[in-house]
Image (cartoon, rainbow, N blue to C red):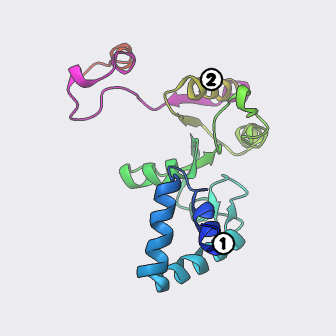
Amino acid sequence: MTELPLVSQLIDALRCLPGVGPKSAQRMAFHLLERDRDGGRELARILAEAMARVMRCRKCRTLSEAELCALCANPRRDPSLLCVVEQPSGVIAIEQATDYRGLYFVLGGRLSPLDGIGPDQLGLDVLAERLRGDGVAELILATSPTVEGGATAQYIAQLAANAGVGVTRIAHGVPLGGDLEMVDGGTLAHAFAGRRAL
């Protein structure tokens, strides 16, 4: 597409989004240019504004337009409960699905030495300081049930133990409404090991 350098640049730019390959990017670019120029202009305006104004909350590290996010600034949240999630999307998921009233800490990933992601990249020094001085009584680990998520949870559990803070981890296992024969062996073994009395 050498005769349309801006179109090619738009297609290449759209490929930065997760899960968007060359064909999907091309489809999106052509849709905006051929059918929805107003939508494209609005997308560009909001995207530029978000890139300029959205930052990390200084306390929990989620995405925010202010120095403190709405959750951290809310005096009705319980500061003795702190839930650790990997991404800001985890905060949204928990807020939408539960009645959790505590605060959060967003890692921005999980420990992965092979990818160069260590404790410093996840703000674990900030978390350790918060555990020592913010009156946290229970740390809830909501990391993913992967090898890296487990290693991250273990590392954070040690930080909490050093600070004298109790640690729990969200349950993992058979999804609600799931059939046992459709669940993979690792998930089923984890669910079976984590069974509890009724």
Front residue (pair 20, 102): 20
* 19 versus 131 height, above or below: below
- Residue 135 % position (x, y): 67, 43
- Residue 14 % position (x, y): 57, 62
Q: How many marks?
A: 2
Outermost residue on the bottom side: it is: 38
Region in magenta: 159-188
User: Mark 2 — residue?
Assistant: 151
Residue 119 location, quadrant = top right
- Residue 44 % position (x, y): 59, 77
User: Mark 1 — residue?
Assistant: 5
Residue 129 location, quadrant = top right
Mark 2 → mark 1, Cα distance in angstroms: 46 Å
Say whether residue 175 is left or right of residue 84.
left
Q: Amino acid at mark 1?
A: Pro
Mark 1 nearby-residue class (10 Å; few <14, some 14–19, many ≥20)? few
* 90 versus 74 height, above or below: above
User: Residue sitting at 69 percent across and 59 percent down?
Assistant: 56
Mark 2 nearby-residue class (10 Å; few <14, some 14–19, many ≥20)? some
